[in-house]
């Protein structure tokens, strides 16, 4: 039997009863639509989390002081630092998997300049920091290694600081005072927005760590060290390397605990992915159930349709249609119905996803795999749930079918 | 058996028994019947006489319980369901009392349908042309794109006749073809059958009306599953001459 003939017959009967066709397809439309929306939204959320984590830094490893205990009292993590600038030199020199190493010396300070004053965080960092944290400039320059060597009083400021101290003007080239030290602004950071935990990442001033260390901090210890690994799959190797180098540097004897902790960015990404991933799976399961219900709807209507068209089946058999011809006719009809439903569902799904994206400012990922999956699933649903009614039609006795009123 | 001696239908001791639980009903009790090519035969009988059962078996819609049935030289009673479908498609054209056209399908597409199910000829590129020609033959060349509900009963029956003709079958089986039509239209339809028969097409017409049977060349009468009378109608009425004198309703 020619496929075009079968398709024509299927389309004829589909268009004969438009209302019923629509109701039949509704289950599949809703199922596929929901599936598309949920996957697009879930993937969008996943992408958003990944981007947020990524904005903290690429392949980032952070070294913190370990929890400090004195006289039986634990002071918690990060309270008492044993990390020194010497550690940074050693990390840079001895490691093979680290792309960048930077201290992070944080000082909270009042700054004065431009139109007023502003309290913000000043970070003393090395030139590697910009690569590690993926900071870019919207204007001006970063400071250089020679600025670090000579403890130059220059700084790069974040967008929030700029808009508070130097509204409506270019801050680059201006001066400001951090505590009582005068600094020259040589660069303006590109805005990064808020971090995953709601911190304003642009409320920041970056200066050479030597300058901050000797002029503002006046401590020989640094609060934390930021390192970046050469590639994501080298993360654990880098972590081991950092541990070995720092233990040697701090002269920690074998068996004694570390006086520092290394936090791996990949752990955060994995956890975030696990959460959003399981949400996506949950959504997909819900969508699959609605697809299943849609499929049962198709079977239901196809069974009614077979009964309703018993006489037509009888006529076709009388003039020479074989059982298989009838089977194929109804199967093709079911498949066309569910595929069309799937197509409409995909369309509606993406329209709704677009509305969610643009209207509600939610992240959406438009990708091909869910579309292919939905199409294949619609096809399978059509074949699976269309087969039983089609089989029933094909085994009708032509005499009984012809006499059916 | 073959078709050399011009026999289209030959049944030998044909029986059909319906059994529902313990009750057995003998619908046909050993039918021996031969119909030669080009014949125009009426099968008559009251309801329950077995003529519908015979009709179903002759039309390859049903299989006999016993005996043999040869259609156009082929022993039919041992064939599979699919083979019976092919036989119906190529050897038999059906005309029913209730027309049995597909609704919401044009006259042309209704007539084309048997060609599309024709496995032997394969996909006929000119199936539309053949269907159109068959419709012209029954005088509906100007109604090809009409749907059944836009046609009168007589016109619908003509479409059905065109459909039965389109595969050039060995036999046309008409089951009460005038049962749903008024007298004048009935005569017109019978005239068409007579015209087709004159062109050499073998027709078997099942009816319970004497009036209709008298237009055929041979009348076989049934009662209780047996042939009680089989005679040649020496002077069949000519329907084409009576059309004008038959009053319209």
Image: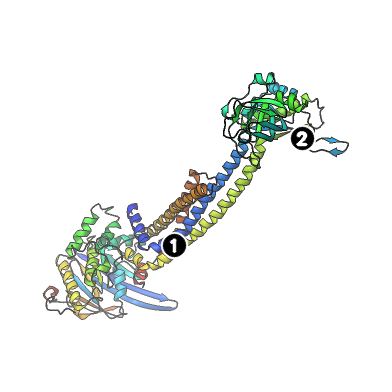
Q: Nearer the viewer, residue B240 or B43?
A: B240
Question: Would you say A200 lies left or right of A15 here?
Answer: right
Q: Which residue is mark 1?
A: A23
Real-space Cα separation, disc 1 to disc 2, in angstroms: 63 Å
Residue A248: where, in percent of width, then height?
77, 24
The residue lying at 36 percent from left, 60 percent from top is A15
Count of numbered circles in the view: 2
Q: Nearer the viewer, residue A205 or A91?
A: A205
Element under disc 1: helix
Element under disc 2: loop
Q: Is residue A97 visible?
A: no
Residue B15: where, in percent of width, then height?
33, 73
- The N terminus of chain A: image quadrant: bottom left
Chain at tag 2: A
Question: Would you say A65 lies left or right of B241 here?
Answer: right
Give the residue at the far right of this rendering: A71
The residue lying at 30 percent from left, 74 percent from top is B52
Give the residue at the far front of this rendering: A115
Question: In the image, which disc is placed on residue A342?
Answer: none
Q: Are marks 1 and 2 on the same chain?
A: yes
Q: Nearer the viewer, residue B3 or A176?
A: A176
Residue A201: where, in percent of width, then height?
64, 37
Image depth: mark 1 or mark 2 in front? 2
Question: In the image, which disc is placed on residue A78?
Answer: 2
Q: Nearer the viewer, residue A394 or A135?
A: A135
The answer to which image quadrant residue A333 occupies is bottom left
Residue A76: where, in percent of width, then height?
79, 38
Mark 2 residue crowding within 10 angstroms, few (<14) / some (14–19) / many (20+): some
The residue lying at 28 percent from left, 74 percent from top is B31
């Amino acid at each position: 039997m020619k496929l075009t003939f079968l398709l024509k017959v299927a389309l004829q009967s589909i268009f004969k009863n438009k209302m019923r066709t629509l109701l039949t397809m509704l289950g599949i439309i809703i199922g596929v639509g929901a599936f598309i929306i949920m996957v697009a939204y879930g993937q969008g959320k996943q992408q958003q989390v990944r981007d947020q984590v990524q904005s903290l830094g690429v392949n980032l490893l952070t070294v913190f002081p370990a929890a400090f205990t004195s006289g039986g009292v634990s002071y918690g993590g990060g309270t008492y630092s044993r990390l020194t600038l010497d550690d940074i030199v050693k990390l840079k020199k001895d490691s093979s998997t680290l792309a960048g190493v930077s201290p992070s010396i944080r000082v909270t300070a009042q700054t004065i300049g431009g139109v007023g004053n502003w309290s913000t965080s000043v970070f003393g960092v090395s030139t590697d920091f910009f690569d590690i944290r993926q900071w870019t400039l919207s204007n001006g320059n970063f400071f250089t290694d020679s600025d670090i060597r000579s403890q130059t009083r220059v700084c790069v400021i974040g967008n929030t600081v700029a808009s508070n101290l130097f509204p409506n003007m270019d801050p680059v080239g201006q001066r400001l005072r951090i505590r009582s030290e005068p600094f020259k602004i040589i660069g303006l950071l590109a805005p990064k927005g808020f971090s995953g935990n709601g911190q304003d990442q642009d409320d920041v001033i970056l200066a050479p760590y030597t300058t901050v260390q000797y002029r503002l901090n006046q401590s020989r210890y640094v609060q934390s060290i930021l390192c970046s690994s050469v590639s994501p799959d080298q993360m654990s190797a880098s972590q081991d390397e950092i541990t070995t180098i720092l233990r040697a540097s701090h002269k920690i004897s074998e068996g004694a605990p570390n006086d520092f902790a290394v936090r791996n960015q990949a752990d955060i990404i994995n956890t975030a992915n696990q959460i959003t991933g399981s949400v996506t799976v949950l959504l997909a399961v819900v969508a699959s159930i609605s697809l299943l219900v849609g499929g049962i709807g198709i079977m239901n209507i196809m069974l009614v349709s077979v009964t309703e068209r018993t006489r037509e089946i009888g006529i076709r058999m009388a003039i020479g249609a074989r059982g298989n011809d009838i089977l194929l006719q109804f199967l093709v009809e079911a498949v066309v119905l569910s595929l069309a439903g799937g197509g409409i569902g995909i369309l509606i799904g993406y329209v709704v996803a677009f509305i969610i994206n643009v209207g509600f400012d939610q992240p959406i990922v438009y990708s091909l795999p869910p579309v292919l999956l939905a199409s294949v699933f619609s096809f399978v649903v059509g074949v699976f749930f269309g087969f039983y009614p089609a089989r029933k039609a094909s085994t009708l006795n032509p005499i009984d079918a012809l006499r059916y009123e | 058996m073959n078709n050399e001696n011009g026999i289209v239908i030959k049944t030998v001791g044909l029986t059909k028994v319906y059994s529902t639980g313990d009750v057995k009903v003998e619908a046909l009790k050993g039918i021996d019947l031969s119909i030669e090519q080009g014949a125009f035969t009426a099968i008559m009988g009251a309801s329950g006489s077995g003529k519908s059962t015979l009709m179903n078996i002759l039309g390859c819609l049903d299989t006999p319980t016993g005996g043999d049935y040869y259609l156009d030289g082929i022993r039919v009673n041992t064939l599979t369901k699919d083979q019976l479908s092919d036989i119906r498609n190529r050897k038999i054209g059906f005309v029913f009392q209730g027309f049995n056209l597909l609704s919401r399908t044009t006259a042309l597409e209704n007539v084309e349908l048997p060609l599309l199910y024709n496995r032997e000829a394969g996909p006929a590129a000119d199936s539309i042309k053949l269907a159109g020609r068959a419709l012209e033959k029954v005088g509906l060349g100007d109604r090809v794109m009409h749907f059944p509900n836009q046609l009168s009963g007589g016109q619908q029956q003509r479409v059905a006749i065109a459909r039965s003709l389109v595969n050039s079958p060995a036999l046309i089986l008409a089951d009460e073809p005038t049962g749903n039509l008024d007298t004048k239209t009935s005569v017109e339809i019978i005239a068409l059958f007579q015209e087709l028969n004159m062109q050499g097409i073998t027709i078997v017409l099942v009816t319970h009306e004497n009036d209709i049977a008298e237009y055929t060349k041979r009348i076989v009468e049934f009662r209780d599953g047996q042939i009680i009378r089989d005679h040649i109608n020496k002077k069949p009425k000519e329907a084409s001459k009576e059309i004008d004198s038959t009053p319209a309703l």
